[in-house]
Each structure stands twice: as structure tokens, then as C-alpha cells.
Image (cartoon, rainbow, N blue to C red):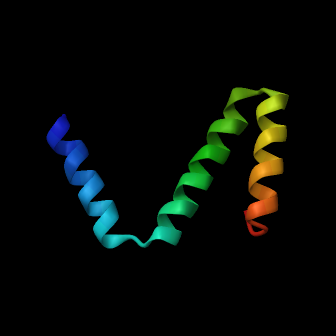
Amino acid sequence: MNVVIKFLKYFICKYFGTIAIEKIIVILLGELVKRTDSKVDDQIYEEVFNKTHGDV
């Protein structure tokens, strides 16, 4: 399992740029927040990511 994680980390860092990795993480966090059904999480996500990234 450790080998797979090292490979994925190397692959992502080598072939994706910083902006692409950042957008992927923001999208994954957004999906996670939507699935939790917690209003506090929704409010924090909206405040943080809509102010820093207008296109999210």
C-alpha cells in the first residue's frame, strides 16, 4: 500500500501543476462538505473558498 501511495504522490506532483492540484483539493473538499449535512461546515466552506476563489 505504501508503494501505491508513493507512486500516486510522485505522479500527481510531476504531471499536475500547483493550480490543478489546488482546484482538485477544493472540489474534493466541497463534495465532502456537501455530504456531511452540517450547516456549520457549509458556512465555513462558503466563507473560505468563495472569498479566496471566486470561480468555485
Q: Is residue 23 left or right of residue 30?
A: left
Residue 17 placement (x, y as % from top left): 43, 73
Question: Which residue is at a point 27% across and 52% down the rendered structure image?
Answer: 8
Picture quadrant of residue 5: top left
Q: How many marks?
A: 0
Q: Is residue 28 left or right of residue 12?
A: right
Question: Which residue is at a point 32% across and 71% down the rendered structure image?
Answer: 15
Picture quadrant of residue 26: bottom right
- Please tell me which residue lies in front, 38 or 22: 22
Residue 21 placement (x, y as % from top left): 47, 62
Up/down of 35 relative to 4, above or below: above
Residue 33 placement (x, y as % from top left): 69, 37
Question: Which residue is at a point 20% across and 52% down the rendered structure image?
Answer: 7
Q: Is residue 28 left or right of residue 53?
A: left
Name the quarter where the C terminus is drawn: bottom right
Q: Is residue 9 left or right of residue 33?
A: left
Residue 47 placement (x, y as % from top left): 83, 49
Q: Residue furthest left?
A: 3
Name the quarter where the N terminus is drawn: top left
Question: Which residue is at a point 77% across and 51% down the rendered structure image?
Answer: 48
